[in-house]
Amino acid sequence: MYHAVYSGASGCGSLGAALVCSDSDSSIVNGLTIGQTYYVQVYTYTSTGGQTSNFNICIGTPCNGNGPGTGTTDLGCPSVVSGGLGLNGADHNAILCTAASTCVDLEATYLDLGNTSTYRVESIPYNPPYQFTCLENPVSVDTDDVWSPVINLPFNFCFYGNTYNQCLIGSNGVITFDLGSNTAGGTCDWEFDSTNPGQLPVSGHSSLIENAIFGVFHDINPGVSGEVGWELITLNTGCRALVASWSSVPLFGDNSKIYTGMIVLYENSNVIEVYIQNKPLDPDAWNDNNAVVGIQNAAGTLAAVAPGRNALDADWTATNEAWRFIPDGTSIATLRWHEGSGTSGPVIGTTPVINVCPTATTTYTAAITYTLCNGSTLVETEETIVTINGSKVWNGSLNTDWDTANNWTPAGVPTASDCVVIPDTANDPIISGTNYNGLGLNLTVQNNAALTVTSNNDLTITEWVNINTTGDLILQNSASLLQINNDVNQGTMHMTRTANIRKLDYVYWSSPVSNFSVNNVSPGTTGNKYKWIPTIASNINGFCNWVGANENMVLGKGYIVRGPDSFTSTVTPFNAVFAGTPNNGIISTPILRGTWNGGTYSTGVSTTLGTNHDDNWNLIGNPYPSAVRAIDFLTLNTNIDGFIKIWTHGTLPSSAIADPFYNNYTYNYTPGDYITYNSSGTSSGPGVFNGNIAAGQGFFVLMHHTSASASENVTFNNSMRSSTYDNSQFFRTSNENGRIWLDLVASNGTNIRNLVAYVDGASNNRDRLFDAITDEKLNFNLYSLIGDLPMTIQGRTLPFDQEDRVPMGIKVSQNGNYTIGIGAVDGFFTNTNQNIYLEDLENNIIHDLRQNPYSFTAEAGNYPNRFVLRYTNETLGGDDLVVDDANLWVYSSDVLSVKSTKNTIQSVRVFDVLGRHLAYYPNVDGYEVPLTTIQKNNAGLIIQVTLSNGSVISKKAIY
């Protein structure tokens, strides 16, 4: 049946030229003018009369690329969604800052893409992202088997590991990136039947070309009818895609069979989709009805094909079918969680689900980075906020003063029940004043913010301190950070400690922060950094020694560091700045001891003898950024003797000072620069040490020989800390007790000091917390005695007894003149009516030390029994005091008492002059015993004393 279309005047007289004249079953006439009249003629050339035929006329509006340019898809573009776990991107519910825990789980969901080295194929729901007809850029117009002009892709597209920005679209349902083997306007081959067989992957095939996307690739004929075109669209996800469609294009072998399909290339994700609205079969099996849905690499060695849709698969038809080709190589997506808004904050996690414990309202950013095949990256981010309510937030609207109410939101200076948050503001807060104590339940210092505590002021936080990465807590010299609970801190603070030193002075340090290198205490000191090893097996009897230190400072351990190389012999302030997380809570520090307990011995390296204690000394230190009360520490740790030794770095090294027991040096520091402290006081006198071990201070302790193990721990805890404990060396004293510091002074001015203290809690026997043994290696020494133990500090019982006697000994290194005088007194001894005498047993002199020091001569040697400290000047009398050669005294004041100054008393029996037994005091096991059951009646008594050495001594007394 012929048909023709004419344009011309109305009626049939003058139709004009035919626009189309054809014997085909159908024709498409393009370029018609709207409003113009056209005439259609349909006729046959049969000779048989009376036959009829039906025909249809379809009139449509020209496309002209009139689509909306926007599409929809369920395929996520490169993106990330963050929020609370399981909340589909919603923020977690707000949390009170006082909650037991502010920890929450956050979740990031994102499109995880692989590189394009391989692909996986998925069947997807048929939801084309865009229309098939009327695309903006038509190609293959009225032309069969042709390649389009070169299409400059509006974005880079990665395909099988290569990046492309140009492609060709073929008439037969194919896109290729190979513009070398295929040319714009050239022939798009179609044949892959039995005469030219092949299926993907294949190399060198004339139709199943390399570096191509087939969807659906088969022999169709846009030269007859239909549309082929492409358009860049923006999707509902915000991403872009290139859509190429073949709409209502007939099969080449049977033009009545219409194919409609689409290929979609997604920007950045490099995903490929194929949508098939209708794919029929040719009844005559043109080209063997072969059709392909798949992709193939540039070498023809790799392909991904939809199941059942390869060239040699059984013939197939499809209606409303869709396939997705997803890059399936190694993931190109890298997830990072950042604290703060954006990606400039610290990375806190790299997994889809993380646990965070914010201490204040905090923004977290999930950032997914896609590394594209050309090396460039694409970063997508989304933020989620964890809200912490109930905090006291610094605003600094008025000034920098912590103690100003309107500097806070809500208004009011924080109390111990407030969660304190310091954000980044123009005015950073400062805690200042005199002995001011800032308070908070917990503390958060946010990024770029700083909180400063000035000297001699405190900050007390009940729970934890969290200093964000670029935030800072600054403690100036003698400032303190105190904490109540044993919570874990986070972040880095800076604490300054100042020591006035010379180049050759050593300072004993301990770190108040974690992970701080001993080398950073004084970077200007070359070498000369040491730690103390309590016992060394290779040394004779395991004596201790210094070894070089090059490590992070162990919590609670002490180290010594010499002054900077640039310092001189002039005393100069030196600042050590400790940077790290502030230490808090229970801290256990290892201590060691050896096994030697056999008396003095030659160490083989020095003329100074070793002693029983020289494998027991441990150098430890205050681990907190606040002072520790020494007595609390000593009371808790019963495996050490009840005193500490602190180095004063007061005397420069000299060749005149004897070698230490552990080595032989030309110049030596004097062990006399150690001060000893216990519950009785400080050996060096009042005003030198206040009993509070300052932050950063190292000190020596003596581990007991009797400890259960040779390796144990000492423990520090927060109960030893208080804002009332001065973190400097300011001394405060009490008048409840009475203490005397006696000085032994040589003719050259060398001096040594000893303390006798009458304090509450002490007895006249050996008390761990009140008595401190002296350093037996001192060549110049003044000591008191408890039995035969020489003491640098001796605590005595209260109430004070005027009749008390304290044996004193001296050790001098050369013949000469010496004096003993009162160095200092406190408590009731500040009353000048309280007499203080020194008895010289060798010269039978009782000297009033209140008047002036006592001068005497002595030859080089040790004199443990030469002197007695006493408080009356009465000559020894038979009726109230008896002294014998065994250092046994019987004396009376309010009660009759027996005292031994050398051996401990085992038992005492009392008889009258007729031999009648009056009293028995068994198991005394001490140096003194009051005979409390004996009444005073001026009667004669016989007192029988059994001593620990087995001797039995009887003395007469009238009482």
Image (spheres, rainbow, N blue to C red):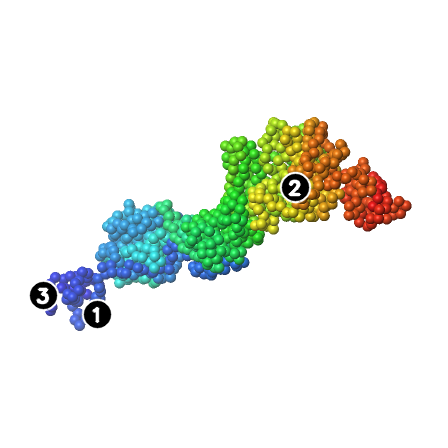
Q: Residue placed at 72% from the left, 28% from the top? A: 859
N-terminal of the pair, mark 2 or mark 1, is 1
Label 3 and label 2: CA atoms lie apart by: 141 Å
Residue 511 point in image, percent of width and height: 55, 43
| Residue position marked by numbered label 3 in the rendering | 14
Which of the two residues, 268 or 308, is positioned nearer the viewer here? 268
Q: Amino acid at mark 2?
A: Val
**Is residue 412 something that shows in the picture?**
yes
The residue that disc 2 covers is 825
Q: Position of residue 956 (x, y in %)?
A: 85, 42
Rounded to the nearest whole Å, what is the CA distance between mark 1 and mark 3? 25 Å
Which of discs 3 and 2 lies nearer the camera? The answer is: 2
| Above/below status of 427 relative to 34 | above
Q: Is residue 801 left or right of residue 135?
A: right
**What is the x, y in percent for residue 118?**
40, 50
- In this rendering, is residue 775 above or below 334? above
Q: Would you identify the image quadrant in which residue 75 lies?
A: bottom left
**Quarter of the figure with residue 848:** top right
Q: Which residue is mark 1?
A: 54
Determine crowd level at label 2: few under 14, some 14-19, many 20+ residues with C-alpha closer than 10 A: some
Q: Quadrant of the N terminus?
A: bottom left
Residue 440 position in % (x across, y down): 52, 54
**Which three-letter amino acid code belongs to the residue tagged 3?**
Ser
